[in-house]
Image (cartoon, rainbow, N blue to C red):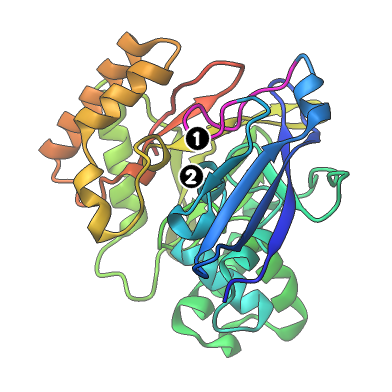
Amino acid sequence: MTSERECYVYIVLPGETEFVTAARFRVSAARNGEPVGEFVYGKRYLERGDAVELDPIELRLGETRFETARMGGFFGAIRDAMPDFWGRRVIERNAGKPALEEFDYLMHGPDDRAGALGFGLNTTPPAPRRQFSRTLDLEALQTMADAIVDDKPEQVVNQADARQVQELLLEGTSMGGARPKAVVEENDGLWIAKFSSPQDRWNHPRVEHAFLNLARTCGLSVADSKITTVAERDVLLVRRFDRDRAENGYRRHRMVSALTLLRSQDDPAARESWSYLLLADEIRRTSAAPQADLRELFGRMCFNAIVSNLDDHPRNHAILGKDRNWRISKTC
């Protein structure tokens, strides 16, 4: 039986760095016992002249009370802000439990999750987090990532540091994917640190870095990346394209995955809808510059086919809302 759970949805508006309360989200059981999600924008939020939609597909701006029975009651834009496989492992480790309810994964996610959304139990949103781990913390983060992958807590440097390092790893839990990662800060902005794994059969960071450089050479819009070596192991750093540094923090940009645009799910049964042609139709409807974005999408499709990219799926494509409009994001 699904218990009723609800929270407030916060958003950082275009050009700003502080959260405002935008909506309320609730998951409860229908008469058949299946979970149903309910989303409604707040009246005060709708009265704002700078209010923007959370996504252009399911949650358009208005007084409508939205409902969904898909994906356990979670709307696509909310699912995009939730942790994937690696993030769930870190959250479970942090909570000391082997598994949590779906709503708990949402609430235990980091403040600095992907996109511009935040979630909490209070009507007033929290102040955005100001401190991030630095690149000099990479060795400790890599050690903790190895411990989580191997399920060996004794690998942590020492017990005094374990909790702090684990909290730092939480900041990377909503970045998607199954591989270990964290968010780190350098003088020029925020980067996603993608670590190697003890089970790797080849140097994943350098191979991914090479593919990003090749895609950039081919004229595709690609996030900046670089390799750093920590304790004789390579770490790939990829600049976050959903953040821009400001004097008083970071501007956060709305982000909606192609999976949400396609109204699809991340499971084998839904792969019939994982289509570049269908995605192109959605880009035409949502993009402020569809001709340029469709050209970019076609280039990515050709590139992924040529290099035999086996990790090409809708969660690796997204549209970004830096202002009121939407454009296809950089690839990373």
Mark 1 vs mark 2: give the one in front.
1
Q: Position of residue 282 (x, y in %)?
A: 34, 25
**Does dot 1 land on a helix, a strand or a loop?**
loop
In the rendered structure, which segment of residues is drawn in magenta?
50-60
Instruction: Note whether 164 is above or below 78 in the view shown.
Output: below
Q: Amino acid at mark 2?
A: Gly
The one nearer the camera, 226 or 289, is 289
- Give the residue at the far right of this rendering: 124
Residue 161, magenta (yes or no): no
Q: In this view, which residue lies farthest toward the front?
A: 31
Q: Which mark is residue 58?
A: 1
- The residue shown at (25%, 70%) is 201
Q: Is residue 51 magenta?
A: yes
Residue placed most toward the observer, 106 or 310 = 106
Residue 290 relative to residue 270: left or right? right
Badge 1: few (under 14), some or many (20 or more) residues near its Cα, within 10 Å?
Answer: some
Q: Main secondary structure of the magenta part?
A: loop
The image shows residue 163 at horizontal and vertical percentages of: 73, 75
Quadrant where the C terminus lies? top left
Looking at the picture, how far across and down is residue 315, in whole percent?
38, 45
- Say what amino acid the circle numbered 1 marks: Glu
In the image, is 219 to the left or to the right of 9?
left
Residue carrying label 2 = 76
Which one is in front, 122 or 73? Answer: 73
Mark 1 or mark 2: which comes first in sequence?
1
Residue at 65% from the left image edge and 71% from the top image edge: 3
Q: Are marks 1 and 2 in contact (CB under 8 Å)?
A: yes
User: Residue 235, can we see it?
Assistant: no
Q: Which mark is residue 34?
A: none
Count numbered badges in the picture. Answer: 2
